Image (cartoon, rainbow, N blue to C red):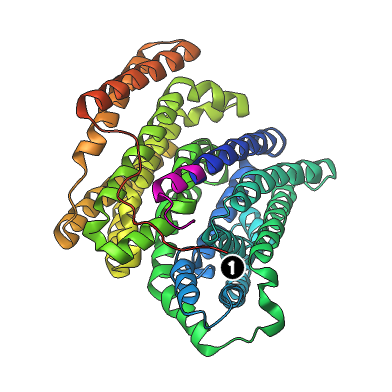
Amino acid sequence: MNLGEDPGRTIMRGAVANAAGFLLRFGGRLIFLFVAARLYGAHLYGAFVIAAALVELAVAIGGLATKKTLYPLLDRAAETQDRPLGHIVVDAALLVTAVSLALALLIAGAALLFAPSDVAAALVLLAPMVAGQALLDLFIAAARWRNKVRYEVISRSLLEPWFLALGATAAFQLGLAEYGLAAGYWCGTIAALAYAVWGTVLHYPGLALASYRPIRAGLGAIARGAAANSTNDFLNALYTRADLYLVGLLLGAEPAGNYGVARQVATPVRQVWQSFDSLLVPAVSKTIGRDGAAGAADALASASRLILVVQLPLLIAMLAIGRPLLAWLGPGFEAGYWALVILGAAEVLQSALGIGDLVFVYLKPRIGLALTLASIAAGIVAALLLIPSFDITGAAFALLTAYALRSALRFAVLHWRFGMPVPHAHLAGPLAAAGVAAAAALAIPAPALALAAGLALYTALVAAWLKVSGQRLALTGFTNGARLNP
């Protein structure tokens, strides 16, 4: 970030770049889903989805929360200049690698002892990628600190999904049907990691490896920052995947495959938040650090408003064309239509309204941990009650229940503990507009016409709300970074 540059504009530029990347990523994911559904079927895909979700759960611990905590460590090192910045990155990479590989061994051993044979085979093959995915998060975070968003865009949005699809297709053609999805996961992870490492080395010249020596203080700072936040990341990852685990446990691999497809098609809603995440998280960190939680209220509210306005048209699109889209991916997958719509609504709650969680990350991690535990408990209870009667639709509704509780608790704690107002004025207009547009889309039987009518009505209503309320879709309230990145 250049000295004096408006942080809101910097975040918006990064969001636009990431959004373009996510379009490519979603295209790759759709191609992969088509390959998985048509070539491998719901059962093998379900086993893969369960295994991949368990690996990603382990990444939440193996990553040691460095994708968030690396920023203040680099900020302090830049101010004190007592160590090369590259050494901070190498410290983190060493710890992440050691912890991730230990977790991979535990996962592989537990899979062989306890998991069903199809899930066990996938888990053993995917377990080493705990390290790959955790390091990918780390090196992307290091590039973000330099405001270099393109490495995340290209690695996560282009290389990873497309190599995943290509690897899975090639493995099937070679007769490796039982291992093809795992082979694709390896291909996608390694390609993305190689590019992210290259970008980091480029902007932290050589990582200063010639003079690097691990020091206890540097490693200890990373470990201390990881303790509460990595536990919270783990619980958040469990929180967002517990529904999938319970579907696999209660219904089996094939329904898990159907549910996994619905989850993947719903991911663009989450990716809107991730488009902003690259530069929003470090900007929020700096704003909270300098102005406190109450001083960051306007920044967080404006970010929630903008993300919500962009996310809601995707939810309208799911209502309008979700059923034919799922049918295109493979016969029988349209049974996940209502699960898809409910999952999309859940993602809106968790991402657009979840920005306030960053206050807990940087000021009170234990409060965030407590909220996560309460939400997980509510989600599990709801899933156990709903899945036996409503199958994958019940699982999706259980997730929505957990996210709704989390949102309510978050607003209450931010208000009473940190003095932050609930941003009703920022959120009411887009939510009301989306409700009217969604009702219109559901009333029209032709999917294409329903999509066009729903989006047109939503756009008109949001524009009217902005004019009447005097609000605008801008990111405001962020502290200027006042830092020159060489």
**Residue at image x 41%, y 36%?**
344
Q: Position of residue 246 (x, y in %)?
A: 44, 51
The quadrant where residue 305 appears: top left
> How many numbered discs, if any?
1
Q: Which residue is more in the foreground, 462 or 396?
A: 462
Q: Residues in magenta?
A: 2-13
Q: Position of residue 340 (x, y in %)?
A: 45, 33
**Vertical placement of residue 385 versus 104, above or below:** above
Q: Position of residue 132 (x, y in %)?
A: 65, 63
The quarter holding residue 470 reads: top left
Depth check: 399 or 393 in front? 399
Q: Nearer the viewer, residue 389 or 272?
A: 272
Residue sitting at the far front:
4
Q: From this view, report whether residue 388 is shown above or below residue 92.
A: above
* Residue 262 to residue 203: above or below: above
Q: Amino acid at mark 1?
A: Ile
- Front one among 104 and 292: 292
As drawn, which residue projects farthest toward the bottom? 216
The residue that mark 1 highlights is: 107
Q: How far from the left and from the top, in percent, is residue 287?
A: 33, 59
Please rate how many residues cluster around mark 1, counting C-alpha atoms within 10 Å: few if below 14, some from 14 to 19, many from 20: many
Q: Residue at x 66, y 58 (%)?
A: 196
Q: Is residue 4 magenta?
A: yes
Above or below 131: residue 20 = above
